[in-house]
Amino acid sequence: MELTFKEFLRGGKEQLTAAGFPEVDAEHLLAHVLGISRMELHNPVTVENAINAIGDITVIEETFWKMLDRRCAHEPLQYLTGVAYFRYLELQVGPGVLVPRPESELLVDAVLKNIEGRDGAVSVVDLGAGSGALTLAIATEAPQTHLIAVEKDPAAVEWLRKNVSRIDETVRILESDVEDALDGVKCDVVIANPPYIPDGQELPKDVAEHEPAIALFGGEDGMTIPRRFINAAARLLKSGGFLAIEHHESQPIDIAAAMLSDFENIHCHNDLVGRPRFTTGTRR
């Protein structure tokens, strides 16, 4: 049994490698089929128990090959397993919501640093919350915060509700467009990951063919929707409030220009490979 298991895992890795995908995806998919973690694949006793619990290695193998075929057709790995990892969180994701990117973790770091410098409870609004990755990272790592997650797309809201119910039910969800959200409300911090990709930009097939366009594209130059988010943040923030907004690597100058009338201390932050990734500023 163990030999057969090793053989079809090796075959899965070879199939993915030939199609141009990382072979480690085969381990993630097989672990998902078996209902164990990827690290547990290296424990023969755990693997054998998982196979025995399912009862039929043929079923396991057929399910595994179907998932490999879907991955080779550029379906995101996170959609296939239903899980995306973000900082210390395990989030539920699937069709209809953007897969959280590790680059966004740096934005969370900047926000947490700002929150640490504030006294008492801190109010945070997440504009365009999607799966809730940013919201829930802050909620779990800065428990003195009160968070509102704003998301207008019904498909994304469904995933947001699932993650909030599992991770932190104190987060308030508001299904609304950012331009109309929370009229009359003031907060200390706004975080935003708007759709910012220029409409004509080509994307990897995983993204272009499967992830929601409404969460990706921000207009002809990618700036139409980010400007709306910046205007909403200016309306929501108290004087001295903090904005952190993610954007395209080509947009830091345009983002800064859009923030200039209402914000000071505007600073662009790079990601781990040196590309402009997000901008922060303080509300005047």
Image (cartoon, grey):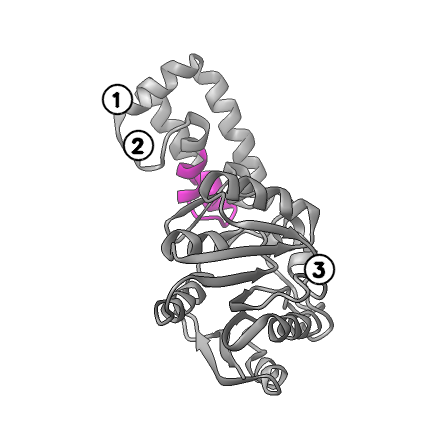
Residue at the spot x=54%, y=70% of the render?
Answer: 245
Establish if 77 lies above or below 200: above
Disc 3 element: loop
Establish if 187 lies above or below 168: below
Residue at the spot x=68%, y=61% of the render?
Answer: 181
Residue 169: x, y in percent? Answer: 49, 43
Disc 2 element: helix
Magenta stretch, main secondary structure class: helix
Establish if 58 lies above or below 220: above
Residue 131 shows in this picture: no
Q: Which region shows up in magenta?
A: 13-29
Q: Amino acid at mark 1?
A: Val
The quadrant where residue 204 appears: bottom right
Indicate left or right for 205 with 118 as reference. Answer: right
> Which of the two discs, 1 and 3, sits closer to the camera?
3
Instruction: State the residue position of label 2.
Output: 40
Q: Amino acid at mark 3?
A: Asp
